[in-house]
Amino acid sequence: MEKSHNAGNFLFMIFWWFVQRLNPHWAHRLLYWGLRDGSFPSGHCKDPRLTINVWGRDFLTPIGIGDGVDKRGNILDSLIQMGFSFGEFGPYTLEKEMPQIQTTYYKKSQAVVVDCDGYRNPGLTKILPWLVKRRYLPHFIGIDLAIPAESEDLNIKQGRRFTYRDEFVLMTQKVAPFVDFITIDFSHPSSELCTMVVDASTIMPILRAVKETIARAAPIQKPKLLVKIPVDLNAMEAPLVAQILFDSQIDGIVIAGPVSLNKNTSMRLEGKRLEPQGMLSGKPAHDAVRELIRKIYHYTQNRMPIIACGGIFTGQDAMDYVQAGASLIFLDQATLTYEGPTILNKIDKELADLLQEKGFATLRDAIGSDFKETKTPD
């Protein structure tokens, strides 16, 4: 019986590899089917140089799975078993959101453009039973909480108007006892919060209320509080956001890879000028993410962990983020669609080789090394 199952997995991998190179849309669907049914091989190469301690916990690799990959609660644990160190469900909103999504794949550029006014997800209540069931698994799992409202005045749910503060508090109260970290998402360009992230008078009361809620809802095993910021912050906004988040005493900053095409109207892919709408993720987002990591690391002076998300396809991509100041790294949906979850082995091996080549004994030594004296290999 085991032999038959292994043969089925092998045939699936061949089929997925073939479809992946012809049609990324179907590869994306097959990825979920394969992960759900256990058709991808588990286990990966472990290198002690990649182990890093963050928040008092040892991660065997800095690579995890970001939000947008698992919105149904049925594949993230499979990815953890394959070797990813941590992962994040979501993004989730208080109620079910089903906006129209238009997805365009650019295979040569390893890019994805998604035009979606909000967060398509089944709502927070759908994931709660799954979180309750899996609470005592050893996996380090979090959840991304988001509010896609265009303005606070239009944020009508459950028959009443919610303030941003009240809605984040309610969602946090529901999930805090069952997760290891909570990400408050300010990154979606269609949300007013994306532009308000530079406003301390708005953001700090929200984060303060969320922290108080975490302390009440999960007093024994408090989840870490992270904040996801948009990658499109300009040179004037980055230091303001860094100071706000540092003063709020959160546990970490997530720098998300999707680039807003509304703010970057000159983007071109494969000889085509992109329409100024939607979000661009994948390989072309790499430089923007790295640049913002450098800015935030510089302004926070390494006083809180930075988690980079998106634009990672090689060990060199990961090394760029680590040397810019990132402690941990999320792989996003674009990477998994184009390369599949077995890319973890490739990234880990290349990253370990680069550490040795650049003269770093551990991953911790390499964090923020762009700002330190150049090291020469032995």
Image: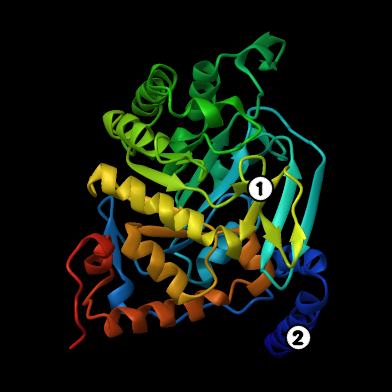
Residue type, label 1: Lys
Q: Residue at x 59, y 65 (%)?
A: 283
The answer to whether residue 153 of the structure is visible from this angle is yes
Q: In front: 64, or 332? A: 332
How many residues crowd mark 1 within 10 Å: few (<14), some (14–19), many (20+)? Answer: many
Mark earlier in primary sequence (1, 2):
2
Q: Residue at x 39, y 39 (%)?
A: 238
Instruction: Tell me the SS state at disc 1.
Output: loop
Q: Residue at x 35, y 44 (%)?
A: 252
Task: Check residue 106 in the rendering and tell me which mark sits there, or answer none.
Answer: none
Residue type, label 2: Ile
The answer to whether residue 139 of the structure is visible from this angle is no
Q: Is residue 237 above or below residue 57?
A: above
Q: Is residue 55 above or below residue 41?
A: above
Q: Which residue is mark 1?
A: 71
Q: Which residue is mark 2?
A: 14
Task: Using residue 75 as the reference point, say whether residue 175 is left or right of it.
Answer: left
Q: Is residue 247 above or below residue 317?
A: above
Q: For the C terminus, give its image quadrant.
A: bottom left
Q: In front: 197, or 344? A: 197
Task: Using residue 196 as the reference point, say whether residue 358 is left or right of it.
Answer: left
